[in-house]
Amino acid sequence: MKVTIIDDDRISIFIAEKVLKLADESIEVTSFISPLDALNHIKSISSPEHLPDLILLDLNMPVINGFQFLENLYEANEKLKSIKISILTSSCSVQDIEKSNTFESVFHFISKPLKLAHWKELKAKLEN
């Protein structure tokens, strides 16, 4: 499984990477501090099998936030809607949860930090 983490907080990325590797050493993790860098990287992938299977996306980031990332991702290529996205954020706002649910690819919402229990729940949803 290929997982991409997009978060402007290096500590959150570090924790998420450790949890993912603890859960399954075979997970391929790519991380981005800049959502723009992540967007450009994902747009540049020409072969669908090289796309991430899952994106863990923070909402509150500078330059463009998680919602703007999603809007730009969808504008880039309709096929990118097939990537499953879980919001991983410090926000507990009902409005953020509701807005996240308006995006077709978003199927899960997690409050930071990522924990092993979160991953197990997320993985079960991915497998269904």
Image (spheres, rainbow, N blue to C red):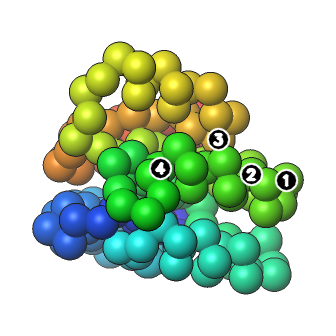
Disc 3, SS: loop
Disc 4, SS: helix
Q: In which quarter of the image is residue 44?
A: bottom right
Distance between the Cα atoms at labels 1 and 3?
11 Å
Nearer the camera: disc 1 or disc 4 = 4
Count neighbours of disc 2 (C-alpha within 10 A) and say few if under 14, some if 14 to 19, many if 20 or more.
some
If you read the primary sequence from the N terminus, does the residue marked by circle 1 or circle 3 appear first? 1
Count neighbours of disc 4 (C-alpha within 10 A) and say few if under 14, some if 14 to 19, many if 20 or more.
many
Question: Residue 112 placed where, x, y %?
Answer: 21, 45
Distance between the Cα atoms at labels 1 and 2?
6 Å
The residue tagged 3 is: 105
The residue tagged 4 is: 66
Please report the residue visible at 48 percent of the width from the left and 58 percent of the height from the top. Answer: 64
Q: In which quarter of the image is residue 102?
A: top right
If you read the primary sequence from the N terminus, does the residue marked by circle 4 or circle 2 appear first? 4
Question: Residue 50 placed where, x, y %?
Answer: 69, 78
The answer to whether one can see residue 13 in this image is yes
If you read the primary sequence from the N terminus, does the residue marked by circle 1 or circle 4 appear first? 4
If you read the primary sequence from the N terminus, does the residue marked by circle 3 or circle 4 appear first? 4
> In the rendered image of this protein, does residue 127 appear above or below residue 14?
above
Compared across the picture, whether 118 is left or right of 115 comes to: right
Nearer the camera: disc 3 or disc 4 = 4
The residue tagged 1 is: 78
If you read the primary sequence from the N terminus, does the residue marked by circle 3 or circle 2 appear first? 2
The amino acid type found where label 2 is placed reads: Tyr
Could you say which disc has been placed on residue 74 in the image?
Answer: 2
The amino acid type found where label 3 is placed reads: Ser
Distance between the Cα atoms at labels 3 and 2?
10 Å
Nearer the camera: disc 3 or disc 2 = 2
Question: Residue 128 placed where, x, y %?
Answer: 59, 34
CB-based contact (under 8 Å), mark 1 and mark 2: yes
